[in-house]
Image: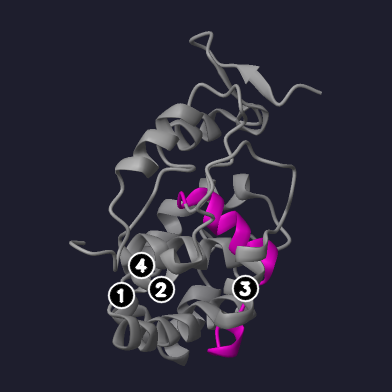
Amino acid sequence: MSSTILGPDGRARCHWCGATPDYLAYHDTEWGFPVGEDRRLFEKLCLEGFQSGLSWRTILAKRENFRAAFHNFEIDRVARFTERDVARLLGDAGIVRHRGKIEAAINNAKRAQELVRQEGSLAAYVWRFEDAADEPPSLRATSPASVAMSKDLKKRGWAFVGPTTVYAFMQAMGLVNDHAPDCAIRAEAARARAAFRRPGAPGA
């Protein structure tokens, strides 16, 4: 099977983005483009955790509901959530109502606060695990870098951050460029990665 499909504009794109129209804009403007904002990084880690056992299509369709329910994934606000908030979220039909995943997001916000205190920002920590080589992607669900980040996050007390979840996060946040070799967006993502100032780098 080809690794790409033709989009409505006739340009080749990664095969997976043809599964639903919602994927096209996400693929073209977000997936694989580097992110250095703590709030967005935390949001994506949470949403990848909620996706566990589900499809990204399900989570993407509910993303705005998640943002509203979790106060736009502001780390400090989520860290202050109480059992009352857990009950509120369990009653919210607009999100994935899974107690373990909800409690993990709250726990992870507290762990993210600790990382910010230790590293200066969540971004500075995350980008230490970048897959630096911008090589053509392989069909893999994990990488040595995602295994290393997963292991370290778990040691720090994070939950729902297995190697596969972390690798999906890395793909989406631009820590690796996994657009197919002949995908029209691959070069755009590569240029964005080249221009991106890594958090914690000199002058950043």
Task: Kindly report the distance in space between the C-alpha atoms of the residues bearing marks 2 and 4.
Answer: 5 Å
Q: Does the magenta stretch include residue 167?
A: yes
* Residue wearing tag 2: 125
Residue at point 57%, 35% (across, down): 179
Task: Kindly report the distance in space between the C-alpha atoms of the residues bearing marks 3 and 2.
Answer: 12 Å
Visible residue check, residue 96: no
Which kind of residue does numbered mark 3 sit on? Ala
Toward the right, the furthest residue is 1
Q: What mark, if any, has residue 121 been given in the picture?
A: 1
* Residue wearing tag 4: 123
Task: Kindly report the distance in space between the C-alpha atoms of the residues bearing marks 3 and 1.
Answer: 19 Å
Labels 3 and 4 touching (C-beta < 8 A): no
Q: Where is residue 135 in the image (x, y as percent from the top left)?
A: 58, 40
Which kind of residue does numbered mark 1 sit on? Ser
Q: Nearer the viewer, mark 3 or mark 1?
A: 3
Task: Kindly report the distance in space between the C-alpha atoms of the residues bearing marks 1 and 4.
Answer: 5 Å
Q: What mark, if any, has residue 148 been given in the picture?
A: 3
Q: Circle 1 sits in a helix, a strand or a loop, which is it?
A: loop
Q: Give the range drawn in magenta.
A: 154-174
Visible residue check, residue 121: yes
Q: Which mark is first along the chain, 2 or 3?
A: 2
Mark 3, other Cα within 10 Å: few <14 / some 14–19 / many ≥20: few
Q: In which quarter of the image is residue 168?
A: bottom right
Please tell me whether residue 26 is drawn above or below residue 141 in the rendered image: above
Mark 1, other Cα within 10 Å: few <14 / some 14–19 / many ≥20: some
- 148 lies left or right of 63: right
Q: Which mark is first along the chain, 4 or 3?
A: 4
Residue at point 57%, 61% (across, down): 48
123 or 50, which lies in front? 123
Viewport quadrant of the C terminus: bottom left
33 or 51, which lies in front? 33
